[in-house]
Every structure is written in structure tokens, then in C-alpha cells.
Image (spheres, rainbow, N blue to C red):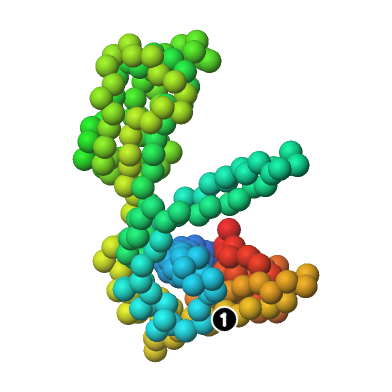
Amino acid sequence: MKTRVFSIITLLIAVVLAYFLISNIKYAIDEEERISKSEGVVIGKLKLIREAEKAYQEVNNRYTNNWDSLINFIEHGKYYVTKRKEVIHLLEYGADSIEVVIDTIDIIPAKQYIFIKNHDVFAADNGDFIEFFVKKGQEIRKGQKMYSMYSATAGKVVNQMSKISGVITSMENVAKNKKLAKGEILFQVREEKFNPNTNISQLAIIPLTNPAAKFDLFADRIEKNRLMVNVVEVRDIKPVDSRRKEDNEANNRKPLRFGSRTEVTTAGNWE
């Protein structure tokens, strides 16, 4: 009788321990998933701020450390699309002088430049065109079949896949068996880099913080190798992962950020 009671008690203890062990494992897995998803949202916001700061710097020759200025630039600023070319002048004594000319070819809203990217898609090789698998106005995804051609390099029919996602805005009228030259334009694709419905007025707010907290924004001109250079850093001061500490030796284990206060870079520490 005692042996039976002892066996039952042992079994109950084992069941309870197994339950707590499984619960702890499940909690750890769920917590990692929660952190990963939450950090993904923060990284998305940092990428948008980075693109905005880069565009601001291209237009104003400096970054801004003021959120209102950055928000106003996105909402109302203009971006100058330029084309760079080199003009060679022959000098009297036989030498050449190269003049760099930068022409403004278009002026577009800053928000359009930051949020949208237009891609030209070119023929991947010399060969014979066979068929399109997509049409104008269609939304495509990365890795989707775009067209097929007989590749002169591969010596066989090859399906060419899209390297981007977006909407096809224009297509060339290419007849079957037409000779294609590598680099010949076939499509134009419009890619939305960021959600167009983003509330720009909340740009400074770190996602999922309660009460709301702002990213730490730093921008300045510093001396580097005897030159004055622009630097920018934007940092998450309320990391969802409590293991992210400023004193971590590994940069990718510090709170999420891009840029640097001392180096000319806009790289993110998640990359």
C-alpha cells in the first residue's frame, strides 16, 4: 500500500515538474517571437527615419536633429532629381580638363522620393525573347516569374525572376523570338518602400511604448581626418528586449539604432 501511494505521489510530482518545464519552454519561445515581431516594427520605423534623413541631407547638405524639421520636410519638402555628367575640355597645351556638370532633371515631393522607388528592369542576357508571364498594372513579388528567353550564355531557355516587389507601370512591346540585347529595358516597376498610410506626425515615437517615448535623435557636423563631415544617429531608448544594453561590447546587442556620432555611416546595427 505504501509503495502504491509513493508511486502515485512520485507520478504527480513528475507531472507537475513536466508541466512547469513545458510552460517555461513555451514562455521562452513565445517571448522570443514577441521580441522579434516588436523589434521588426521598430526597425521598420528606423528605416523610414533613415531614408528621410538621407533625403534631407541630400537636399540641405546636412542632417537635421529636429523632429519638426524632418516631419515638415517629408510632408512639404521637394527633392531635386539630378543627373551628373562629365564634360571634357581640351586645353591649349594638349591636356584635358574635366568639368563635372550636375543638371536638375525633375523636382518631386520629398515624400514621393522617400516612400516610392521606380525600377527599370532590363534583359538579363543576349538571346531570343519567348514570352511574358506578367502584364502592365499587375502587382508582382520578389522571386516571381517575369518572362522567359533563350539565353545565349546558358544555351537554353531560362525563366527570369523578379528581384523586387511592386507594381508594373509599363512594359515594352516585345514580339516572340525578338533578339534581345543584355541591358535592354523591358519593364518599369513601382515599389512602395514604406506604407503610404504611415502617420508622419508620429515619426519620432518609438512603436509600442506606453507612455509614448521618442527616439533619441542626434545630428551634427564633426571634424574627421581634417575634414568637416555630417553625422547622424537615431537610437531606440526603450528597447523591448531588456538584454539590449548600451554597455554591451557587441554593437548588434546594443539598443536598436542606425548611424553613429563619430563615424560617417547610416548603417543599422540590426544589419
Can residue 194 be spotted in the picture? no
**Residue 256 x %, y %:** 56, 71
76 sits to left or right of 92: left
Residue 79 shows in the view: yes
Q: Residue at x 47, y 24 (%)?
A: 182
Which residue is the site of mark 1? 218
Nearer the observer, 143 or 153: 153
Q: How crowded is the residue under tag 1: few (<14 C-alpha within 10 Å), some, or many (20+)?
A: some
Q: Quadrant of residue 266?
A: bottom right
131 shown above or below 64: above
Q: Quadrant of the C terminus?
A: bottom right
Q: Quadrant of residue 192?
A: bottom left
Residue at 66% in and 67% down: 264
Residue lying farthest right?
225
Q: Is residue 64 above or below residue 253?
A: below
Vertical placement of 85 versus 21: above or below? above
